[in-house]
Image (spheres, rainbow, N blue to C red):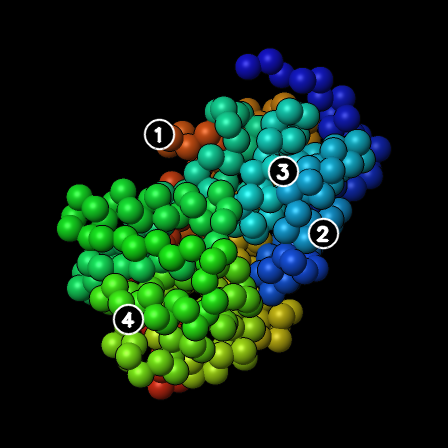
Amino acid sequence: MNTPPSSPGAERTDGSSVRIGALVPLTRPGWVGAGRHLLAGLELAVREVNDAGGIAGRPLELVVRDTAADPQRAAAAVAELARLGVAALAGEYHSVVARAAATRADALGLPFLCSSAVLDALTEQPTQWVARLAPAQSRGWQIYADFLLSAGHSRIAIAAESSVYWASGTRILRDYLAPRGGTVIQLDMRALAPTAVCDELAGNRATALLLLVGHPEPAVSIVKSVRRDQRLTEIMIGAPAGQPEFTEWASLLGDDGAAIPFLRYLPERLSPLGARVETALRERLAEAPSFVAFEGYDTIAALAEVLRSHGTDRARTAQSWPHVAVEGTRGQIQFSRTPGISVWQWAGTPIQVADRDPVEPDRFRILHTS
């Protein structure tokens, strides 16, 4: 692969800040709650890096751009940040947006450490410029499928909207469940109202309904409709994409939002570093930090280690991914090549299936781990 000229991100010796471009969904239709947590983690880690002396004596600076869940807006932000001379990119929560950002970063020769997006194909071709902390969707959603089977669910309905991300999730679940005796029944949410979903569920004898739809709508309306339908009292609702992780889910749904299993990327027990960061994030957010906040912190921790060890030249940063070994809040972060994944991947990301406790909805129960 040819290496583009690295002069815009070349080593500086004038004492100016080392700038990191941060892509974050901060306005609708982006998932604002996730964006707020992601940014809190990024900002906390930057503060700690600077308190510890920065990057070779130079302060680390975040240059934040709101993607608003818009792929075109994200791609334009990447181009702008490249022109501004950032050393690397960090962040992004939405998979389809991250894919647009990764494609542009690859084309421009700008290192991008993606914090949260899970779509397997972040770029069409293998790239040296992009690395990722979140697990690939195929790994996480297969673990979720294992959970479904272990809980006795083999006839599973999927309420899905139209997007590359939801289509990918549906395919992963179907391909994994079918050889193991599972059946996937797809409900097209372009054609069904939430109340009509209930009729479909009652008619097809599904024991589980998975929400592969946007938040808050139509996810919240679907949950309310199913919870209130006497025909469906035994059905399990699941949300593999992680919607119940955030306090907005609990505030909108109350008790109806409990007992809905979802994927989250946390270990069963945090390390001392993770526990310290959790306390600091809780203070910053004025609520319990989600796994997305930890992803933000770990992104900067990894990038700071790269920049300290290899300098701020973009090409050297891209070449350093396989040499990263840094303690994160959720384990030792190292990147490797994973079959079928086009970017450098942290293969050791912890994965768990959790839900909100029906007795105490502010408490999470761990139901299944990788």
Q: Amino acid at mark 3?
A: Ala
Marks 3/1: CA distance? 22 Å
Q: Where on the picture, by quarter, is residue 108?
A: top right
Q: Where on the picture, by quarter, is residue 263?
A: bottom left
What residue is pinned by disc 2? 66
What residue is pinned by disc 1? 339
Report the front residue among 125 and 269: 125
Horizontal and vertical percent for residue 210?
Answer: 36, 61
What residue is pinned by disc 4? 202
The secondary structure type at the circle numbered 1 is loop
The secondary structure type at the circle numbered 3 is helix
Name the residue furthest bottom: 359
Mark 2 and mark 3 lie on one chain; the one further toward the N terminus is 2
What residue is pinned by disc 3? 101
- Report if the CB atoms under discs 4 and 3 are less than 8 Å apart: no
Q: Amino acid at mark 2?
A: Asp
Marks 4/3: CA distance? 41 Å
Marks 2/1: CA distance? 32 Å
For label 3, the crowd category at 10 Å Cα-Cα, with few meaning under 14, some 14 to 19 and many 20 or more, is many
